[in-house]
């Protein structure tokens, strides 16, 4: 039973990774912008400590 759930989780993770890879290849500048925005937010949150 645990192995079945494990396999489902691995399959969903691989599917999400493939979808992300396709999106980044189709829209590289959007991906860069999102990554920069997330980095900025994390940097601001860490800097407030």
Image (cartoon, helix red, strand yellow):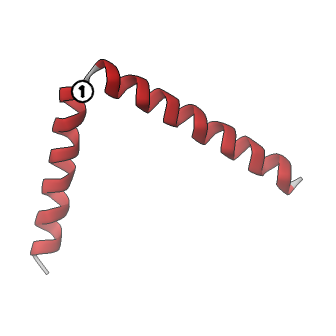
Q: Position of residue 7 (x, y in %)?
A: 76, 44
Label 1 environment density (alpha carbons within 10 Å; few <14, some 14–19, many ≥20): few
In this orientation, which residue lies closer to the viewer: 1 or 11?
Answer: 11
**In this picture, is 43 found above or below 49?**
above
Q: Residue furthest front?
A: 25
**Which residue is at a point 68% across and 37% down the rendered structure image?**
11
Q: Residue furthest right?
A: 1
**Which residue is at a point 16% across and 46% down the rendered structure image?**
36
Q: Could you tell me how many numbered marks the image carries?
A: 1
Q: Does residue 8 appear to the left or right of 49 in the view shown? A: right
**In this picture, is 34 found above or below 38?**
above
Quadrant of res 20:
top left
- SS class, disc 1: helix
Q: Position of residue 45 (x, y in %)?
A: 16, 68
**In this picture, is 21 found above or below 2?**
above
Quadrant of res 47:
bottom left
**Which residue is at a point 26% across and 22% down the rendered structure image?**
27
**Which residue is at a point 84% across and 46% down the rendered structure image?**
4
> Which quadrant is home to the C terminus?
bottom left
Query: Residue beneath label 1, please?
Result: 28
Q: Position of residue 37 (x, y in %)?
A: 15, 46
In this orientation, which residue lies closer to the viewer: 5 or 15?
Answer: 15
**In this picture, is 17 found above or below 42?**
above
Q: Residue furthest top?
A: 26
Q: Does residue 14 appear to the left or right of 27 in the view shown? A: right
Q: Does residue 9 appear to the left or right of 17 in the view shown? A: right
Q: Position of residue 26 (x, y in %)?
A: 31, 18
């Amino acid at each position: 039973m645990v192995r079945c759930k494990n396999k489902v989780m691995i399959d969903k993770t691989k599917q999400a990774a493939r979808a992300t890879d396709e999106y980044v290849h189709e829209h590289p500048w959007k991906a860069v912008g999102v990554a920069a925005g997330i980095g900025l937010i994390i940097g601001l949150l860490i800097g407030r400590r």
